[in-house]
Amino acid sequence: MADLKKGARITGATRDKIAADLKKKYEKGASIRGLAESTDRSYGFVHRILTESGVRLRARGGVSGSKKKP
């Protein structure tokens, strides 16, 4: 991913490239928080980029590991 200064405005082709990269990682199972931390961007920025990219966001809490008891 492009090396960007924290808080820098991201537009045009750079934004499209970042959006595609974040979308791919999110769809492979990465969390929004994890993506935000790894890109040094805010949770809100990553959430907005994913939403703008048409990604269907997962429910809060991730995958539940609970099983029904017999």
Image (cartoon, rainbow, N blue to C red):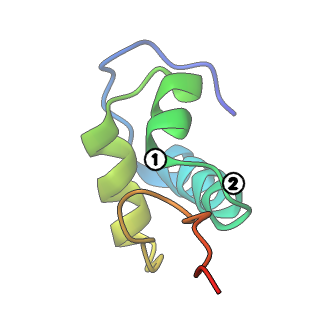
The residue at 58%/81% (across/down) is: 68
Q: Which mark is residue 70?
A: none
The residue at 38%/70% (across/down) is: 59
Quarter location, residue 28: bottom right
Give the Cα distance between marks 1 and 2. 10 Å
Q: Amino acid at mark 2?
A: Lys
User: If the image is split into quadrants, where does the N terminus sit?
Assistant: top right
Looking at the image, which residue sits at the far front? 70
Q: Which mark is residue 25?
A: 2
The residue at 50%/60% (across/down) is: 62
Q: Amino acid at mark 1?
A: Ile
7 is higher (above) or lower (below) than 49? above
Mark 1 and mark 2 residues within 8 Å of each other at the beta carbon: no
9 is higher (above) or lower (below) than 11? above
* Relative image position of residue 52 (x, y in whole percent): 35, 70
34 is higher (above) or lower (below) than 32? above
40 is higher (above) or lower (below) than 11? above
Looking at the image, which residue sits at the far left? 44
Q: Earlier in the sequence, mark 1 or mark 2?
A: 2
- Secondary structure under the numbered disc 2 in the rendered image: helix
Looking at the image, which residue sits at the far top? 5
Residue closer to the observer: 46 or 28: 28
Quarter location, residue 53: bottom left
On screen, residue 44 versus residue 58, left or right, reads left
- Give neighbour class at mark 2: few <14, some 14-19, many 20+ (Cα, 10 Å): some
* Relative image position of residue 35 (x, y in whole percent): 54, 38
The residue at 59%/62% (across/down) is: 23
Residue picked out by circle 1? 32
Looking at the image, which residue sits at the far bottom? 70
Residue closer to the observer: 5 or 24: 24
